[in-house]
Each structure stands twice: as C-alpha cells, then as structure tokens.
Image: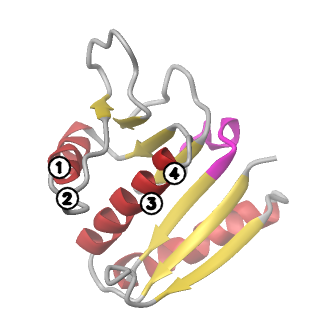
Amino acid sequence: MTRVDFYILQDVDLAAAHRFACRLAAKAVTTGNRVHIHTDDQPAAAELDEMLWHYPEHRFIPHDCEGATLTQPSPLLLGWNQPVDPDGVLINLASEIPTFFGRFDRVAEVVVEATRDLGRERYKFYRDRGYPLFHHELEDWEAA
C-alpha cells in the first residue's frame, strides 16, 4: 500500500514548498528511487525545471520534463499528467491529489502556511481511505 508522508514546513510561501521538493527529490534520487514531481501544468513544471538547474546549490539532479524525447529516462520526471511508468516516489505539488497516486510506493505532500487548509483536506482524504500516514514537522530545513 502507498505510504503518504506530509512534510509541514514552517514557511509561508509556495516557493519554499518548491525548494523543499527539489531537496526531497535529490535525496530520493541519490538513494536509488525514481521520482515524479507532479504539477498543475506545463508552466509550473518549467519553473521547477529551471530551479533544479540551480537548487540545491552545487548539486545537479538529472531530470526531464514530461513530453521530452528520451533515449534513456532520467530518475526524476517533472510532469502534469499521469506518467507512463508510475513507480517510486510521487511528490505532489499540484492543487489536487492525482488519481494515479496509488500506483506509487510513496507520496510526499508538502505543506506551507499558504496551503495549510489544503493539506488538512488531503490528510483526511488519505486517512479516510486507510493509507499509512506519516507527519514530519520541519524547521530550518534549508540549513541542513
């Protein structure tokens, strides 16, 4: 069954959620996981694509955006539709829970002050369906 982790950041804006998603993706990739960062649309994925070239600093995370012609898939895919081969870790940055979330081993929901109410709704959604939930309160996560 899919494990769902809620990362509660002591930050206000969505930019912090995006930076945390990049760090979380880097960690997951370095431990051998495939990662799909799910966004609402192509412009949001393009924004993350640009961020991944510079953040976390001094690290490069091999990644691709949905729709790219690939000879060899990268361990990290940025997309706004259901991936062809869902597997590994799903980091959900979209405004809704994707219908295909259960095809991943793990789901990460990143919550900041701007999305706190949405995070509560998502928690109830997963809880009511019996998914194992884990809660992580993070302070000073960028200092680590």
Is 126 displayed left or right of 5 in the figure? right
Is 104 displayed left or right of 51 in the figure? right
Residue located beneath label 2 in the image: 58
Scheme of image coloration: secondary structure
Residue 113's x, y, as percent?
38, 85
Question: Can residue 94 be seen here?
Answer: no
Query: From the viewer's perspective, is residue 58 above or below residue 39?
Result: below
Tag 2 or tag 1, which sits nearer the N-term? 1
Disc sitting over residue 47 in the figure: 1
From the viewer's perspective, is the residue at label 1 or at label 3 nearer?
Answer: 3
Look at the numbered discs 3 and 4 and tell me whether their residues touch, using CB distance below 8 Å.
yes
Magenta includes 100?
yes
The image quarter containing residue 86 is top right
Q: Residue type at mark 2: give it.
A: His
- Image point (51%, 51%), residue name: 28
The image quarter containing residue 66 is top left
* Distance (Cα) linking label 3 and label 2: 15 Å
* Distance (Cα) linking label 4 and label 1: 20 Å
Q: Residue type at mark 4: give it.
A: Ala
Depth check: 128 or 42 in front? Answer: 42
Residue located beneath label 3 in the image: 24
Residue located beneath label 4 in the image: 28
Q: Residue type at mark 3: give it.
A: Leu
User: Which span of residues is magenta-colored?
Assistant: 98-106
